[in-house]
Image (cartoon, helix red, strand yellow):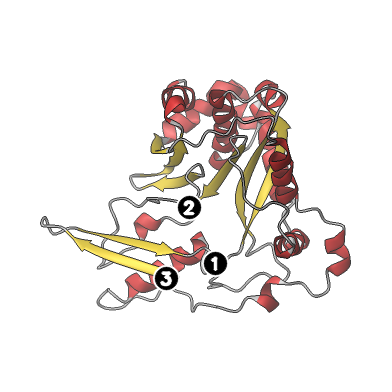
Amino acid sequence: MPLVAAQVTKFDCGGYSIGIGISHSVFDGISAFDFLRAWASQCQAPISTSQIYKPVHERGTLLVDKDSSTATNSVNPTAIDHLYQLIRQAAPDHPNQETNTLVLRTFHLSSAMIENLRKKFWGEKRDKFSCSSFELLAAHLWKVRTKVLGVERERKVCLQFAVDTRKRMVPPLPKGFSGNAFVLASLVSTAGELEERSYEYIIDQIKEAKNSINHHYVDAYIKALRGPPQVATLPPLPELTLISDWTRAPFHRVDFLGEAAAYASPLLPPIPQVAYFMQNPDDCRAMDVRIGLLPRVQAAFSHQFINII
């Protein structure tokens, strides 16, 4: 499999599409976005190089803190620990492992819908409780997905989301770093506790998990990944909700030939159940959520996630 593959398709109407596949061992989302912008800059006349950073391909010395061995030993990479908790929970006596082909769906949440969701749970108090649209929709997605999947109340469920570590490292990674600079933040609960807890409580936990990511966490995370695998294969984990935030990498704004794209979206992600949060091309305050769903829960998910707002 090539590390990078691209295909340009021109349509009879004069429009075109660009498809690109990149190994995650080479680029993360931010690096892929920078790569596409650099490529697009070469297709413009005159060539524009504003905000195009020279790629930095160095890895080891930038990502490994040589002075943090003691601190690393005391830091627990919670995302990996929580993942193994779910794997141990998925024992043979719980054969609830559906392997149906997931259906990829994209849900559009306008800025008005996001504001309505704030009003629904905080009313007039919403000005006193600050949270980002990502934090609000992450909490909403976790609760809704767990509910429609019918996870048993006593079983552990986990929310994990990618955090960019470029500015969290000491020293920060240089602009143009072209590699993987993401780790997963994680929080865990039982399905019953998740259903009963308020949005405010869950959002506070999301903030706490995000703020726990520092260079010591990254070192411990890398060390854990380099260790021997504790399982041969990863079983299906319906209790795991994964989110990848693309809102800071608006691929639709990459202007090949001086024109922004009508739309940009992951077509076939390596893990179909991952939810991608993306900017909407027509409303920068809106969000598109693309996620893989089991056919049996599509209607219920759509109703709980969108229609009740």
Whether tag 1 and tag 2 are in contact, CB under 8 A, the answer is no
Q: Residue at x 31, y 64 (%)?
A: 255
Helix, strand or loop at disc 2? loop
Q: Position of residue 241 (x, y in %)?
A: 59, 39
* Amino acid type, mark 1: Ser
> Which sits earlier in the primary sequence, circle 3 or circle 2?
3
Q: Residue at x 62, y 54 (%)?
A: 163
> Which sits earlier in the primary sequence, circle 1 or circle 2?
1
User: Is residue 281 left or right of 52 when viewed as pictured?
Assistant: left
Asked whether residue 65 is in view, the answer is: yes
Residue highlighted by disc 2: 270
In the figure, 235 relative to 252: above or below? above
User: Is residue 237 left or right of 289 when viewed as pictured?
Assistant: right
Helix, strand or loop at disc 3? loop
Residue highlighted by disc 3: 2
Q: Residue at x 44, y 25 (%)?
A: 296
- Number of residues whose C-alpha sits closer than 10 Å to that of mark 3, classed few (under 14), some (14–19) or many (20 or more): few
Q: Position of residue 268 (x, y in %)?
A: 40, 50
